[in-house]
Image (tube, helix red, strand yellow):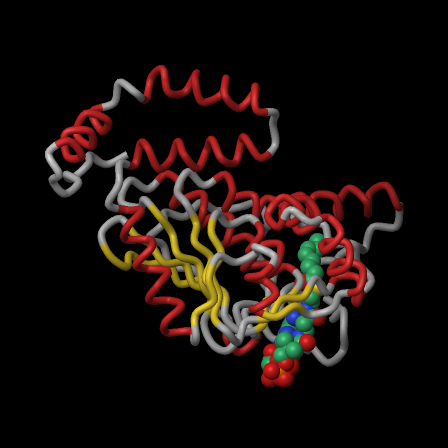
Amino acid sequence: MLSLFGRFSSRSIGNMSLLSRNCSSSSQYETLVVKSHSPFVYHVELNRPDRLNAFNKTMWREVREAFEALSEDKECRVIVLSGSGKAFTAGLDLSDAGLVVNDEEDIARRCRTMYKIIKAYQGSFTALEKCSKPVICAVHGPCIGAGVDMASSADIRLCSADAWFQIKEVDIGLAADVGTLQRLPKAIGSLGLVNELALTARKFLSAEAKECGFVNTVYPDKPSLIKAAFEMADSIASKSPVAIQMTKKSIVFSRDHTVDESLEHIAIWNQALLQSEDLMKSAVAAATKSPLPPFSKL
Ligand SMILES: CC/C=C\C=C\CC(=O)SCCNC(=O)CCNC(=O)[C@H](O)C(C)(C)COP(=O)(O)OP(=O)(O)OC[C@H]1O[C@@H](n2cnc3c(N)ncnc32)[C@H](O)[C@@H]1OP(=O)(O)O
């Protein structure tokens, strides 16, 4: 495997298929730490700190597997995503991108292989959006290239003051292709700013990320960021999982559909979900000014 850039030497080259292996949410991963943090709250930590959590082939695969597993895990109601070490992520692993793969001579065959890789990498971040549980993305330090794609597919973004973001792809000769150009305009509501950031690859700092609405809140440092992310997660986990999962589903659906289509979508779902025991339990708690009751697993 050739390195895309000589300076980023190849240290760990994943040799497993992009599209293989199913893990449960408690499985051991090579590039992630996935663990239960508090009742119904899971922590997914990008864990290649010596490579600044750059995405090698194994990490691309494991991210998809982890979020697909957590989506089905009844012990999980909400997920905090963060990075270990000094960066959230330096983006694509330039020594193990999986993009210089082709020994096939024919262009059509090479294209087919490349298409499958791009679709698989897209699927890794779409797995956050498709995950039935909300994902809170807590960014510290550099968040570059694929990192912005990943953060864009989370439901809530928080960051520390030292966080900085960069849609770096044009600097390495790529048009970003795993979600930033599709999701960021909808997250920050300014196509003009997305154009500027994606076309110039200039860095934007935590204050600008907050100002444009990409992150909700900026915390002074990583410990306070992580603490706040888990407090938010605990609050979400205390609520009806029926209500939380449907709220996420409806918000994601509504982003990409008309108001009429989205109202129809929630009406069809809620004709069933309004009959859930969670509604009655929550309504009684509200009426009697009692704390929320425990909810059955979902
Ligand atoms: C189908 C395609 C799908 C997705 C495409 C995504 C595109 C992208 O993600 S584009 C962005 C690619 N990333 C970069 O260009 C960032 C490169 N890194 C840096 O510029 C710097 O490392 C830094 C983030 C500014 C941090 O600098 P510094 O604090 O000085 O740390 P370093 O000494 O540079 O890095 C420490 C260590 O990590 C290795 N490393 C850093 N980034 C990457 C990377 N992207 N890929 C592989 N390895 C990386 C770096 O080589 C160092 O390793 P040593 O062995 O200690 O030298």
Residue occupying the far right of the picture: 106
Answer with the quarter of the image where residue 28 lies. Answer: bottom left
Q: In this rendering, would 210 be left or right of 45? A: right
Whether residue 94 is visible: no
Q: In this rendering, would 244 be left or right of 147? A: left
Classify the position of ligand 1 by quadrant: top left, top right, bottom left or bottom right.
bottom right
Q: Residue at x 76, y 69 (%)?
A: 4
Residue occupying the far bottom of the picture: 7
Query: Residue 95, image x and y in percent?
Result: 68, 70
Whether residue 63 is visible: yes
Front in this rendered view, residue 34 or 210: 210
**In this view, 57 is above or below 49:** above
Q: Residue at x 14, y 38 (%)?
A: 293
Query: Residue 82, image x and y in percent?
Result: 45, 63
Query: Residue 47, image x and y in percent?
Result: 46, 68
* Quadrant where the C terminus is found in the figure: top left
Front in this rendered view, residue 197 or 42: 197
* Quadrant where the N terminus is found in the figure: bottom right
Q: Residue at x 45, y 22 (%)?
A: 266
Query: Residue 250, image x and y in percent?
Result: 47, 31
Answer with the quarter of the image where residue 295 lies. Answer: top left
Q: Residue at x 44, y 45 (%)?
A: 22
**In this view, 165 is above or below 189:** below
Number of marks present in the image shown: 0
Front in this rendered view, residue 17 or 7: 7
